[in-house]
């Protein structure tokens, strides 16, 4: 019985840790990106827009099919005055009442309409391609949002590690100062300064933990994970990547940026619209066939020779001649609209070039910052070592010792942040080319 009680007690102690472990999910950057793409509501909406565009394309294709319709009408007439006399001749007697069935069926097919049906299909297909590019752009935005948030979580995680090291070091320094105080080597004020430093670092740790929870929650939402999931991240950087020449990124952006490709498609749509407007001034030709069923008897299916069924075939050539002088301004309007699209692309291309250059220079600066900070850490480490030795020998004050240690750990934090900023700056540069995954 006692043995079982001990086992249950151990289980109770382990249960919170087991529950916590179930809410922890370890993710690499690529796994996080994949989750974000799979669960993005914006991408699902983009896919729905693509399906809507494809449905419109099918509707446009259906408009080129023959039209057919059929109808049946029943007519009953009461004729109270059924005697008719014309110019004093013999009277004509009509029945008191009459019933009739009249049916029609027709098929019509537009053979030539100036190419308007073909232009409509081509235009709708291009608009579906625009919708696909819009979805590609949204996927790039989702990918970058995941990368940005992942790096933010990495930065606070690294900061917490450095702060934890700093707290451990300060605790050691505090014990040393208390020992020196007991030996009469330092004053009580030195002990208080180390205690104050420990309190300030603890406050910093609390702020970092608060930021970590906020960023972790935001990443849970982005990835479609339960909101209480603790994400265990890995180092997203795989060494500093050397940047290609600036012009290589500019050329890639001009080829891949979704906005520019969309404007190219819109320019093609505008060209088709011009052809469609011109087609308004051309003749149209269509053919058709009609069947009529006329039955003056009361029954829907009468005996033979009690109904007639004429059939007709037709060919229609029509031309709205007035469009020859009223359509030219519509064509001019369509050309002006196409010209506007070309100007928009020139403006957008310039914006893309300036964006690429800005992100390129930012990445170069971020890499150079890492080199500078690595040198500063070496200097801060040496300075901290010297001040530690001087403090132990009662040559330096507690303030000097604390300042040296603070500079070292601040340099370490700055280096970790700089590495993360450089990684994010690289992905920002790739995003501005229109293709993050390369």
Image: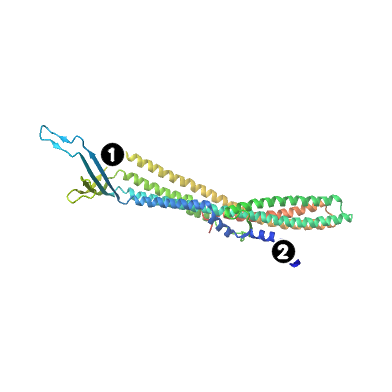
Which residue is rendered at x = 24% and y = 45% of the image? 102
Q: How many marks?
A: 2
Front residue (pair 313, 36)? 313
Mark 1 is surrounded, within 10 Å at the Cα level, by few (under 14), some (14 to 19) or many (20 or more) other residues, namely: few
9 versus 227 height, above or below: below
Residue at far left of view: 89
**Between tags 2 and 1, which lies in front?**
2
**Residue 131 as seen in the image, left or right of residue 203:** left
Residue highlighted by disc 1: 322
Pointer 2 residue = 8
Instruction: Provide residue 134's location: percent of width, then percent of height.
Output: 48, 51
- Picture disc at residue 111: none
Q: Secondary structure at mark 1?
A: loop
Q: From the viewer's perspective, tell me whether residue 412 is left or right of residue 146.
A: right
Horizontal and vertical percent position of residue 383: 76, 56
Q: Is residue 408 toward the left or the right of residue 180 in the image?
A: left
| Residue 399 visible | no
Residue at 71% across / 61% down in the picture? 12
């Amino acid at each position: 019985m006692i043995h079982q009680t001990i086992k249950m007690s151990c289980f109770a102690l382990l249960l919170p840790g087991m529950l916590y472990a179930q809410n922890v999910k370890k993710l690499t950057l690529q796994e996080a990106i994949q989750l974000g793409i799979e669960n993005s509501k914006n991408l699902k909406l983009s896919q729905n827009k693509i399906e809507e565009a494809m449905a419109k394309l099918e509707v446009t294709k259906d408009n080129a099919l023959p039209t057919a319709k059929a109808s049946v009408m029943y007519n009953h007439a009461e004729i109270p005055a059924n005697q008719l006399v014309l110019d004093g001749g013999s009277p004509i007697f009509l029945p008191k009442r009459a019933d009739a069935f009249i049916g029609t069926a027709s098929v019509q097919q537009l053979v030539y309409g100036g190419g308007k049906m073909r232009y409509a299909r081509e235009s709708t297909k291009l608009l579906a391609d625009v919708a696909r590019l819009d979805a590609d752009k949204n996927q790039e935005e989702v990918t970058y949002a995941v990368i940005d948030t992942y790096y933010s979580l990495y930065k606070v995680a690294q900061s917490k590690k450095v702060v934890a090291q700093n707290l451990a070091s300060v605790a050691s320094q505090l014990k040393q100062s208390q020992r020196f105080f007991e030996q009469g080597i330092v004053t009580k004020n030195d002990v208080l300064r180390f205690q104050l430093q420990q309190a300030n670092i603890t406050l910093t740790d609390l702020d970092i933990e608060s930021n970590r929870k906020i960023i972790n929650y935001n990443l849970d939402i982005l990835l479609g994970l339960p909101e209480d999931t603790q994400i265990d991240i890995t180092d997203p950087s795989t060494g500093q990547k050397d940047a290609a020449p600036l012009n290589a990124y500019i050329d890639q952006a001009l080829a891949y940026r979704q906005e520019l490709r969309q404007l190219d498609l819109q320019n093609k749509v505008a060209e088709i619209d011009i052809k469609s407007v011109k087609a308004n001034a051309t003749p149209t030709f269509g053919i058709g066939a009609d069947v009529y069923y006329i039955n003056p008897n009361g029954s829907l299916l009468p005996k033979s020779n009690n109904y007639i069924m004429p059939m007709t075939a037709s060919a229609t050539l029509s031309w709205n001649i007035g469009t020859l002088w009223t359509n030219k301004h519509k064509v001019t309007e369509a050309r002006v609209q196409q010209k506007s699209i070309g100007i928009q692309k020139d403006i957008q291309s310039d914006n893309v070039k300036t964006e690429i250059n800005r992100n390129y220079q930012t990445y170069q600066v971020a890499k150079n910052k890492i080199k500078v900070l690595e040198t500063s850490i070496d200097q801060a480490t040496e300075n901290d070592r010297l001040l530690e030795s001087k403090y132990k020998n009662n040559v330096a004050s507690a303030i000097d010792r604390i300042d040296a240690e603070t500079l070292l750990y601040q340099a370490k934090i700055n280096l970790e942040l700089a590495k993360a900023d450089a990684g994010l700056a690289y992905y920002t540069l790739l995003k501005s080319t229109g293709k993050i995954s390369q």
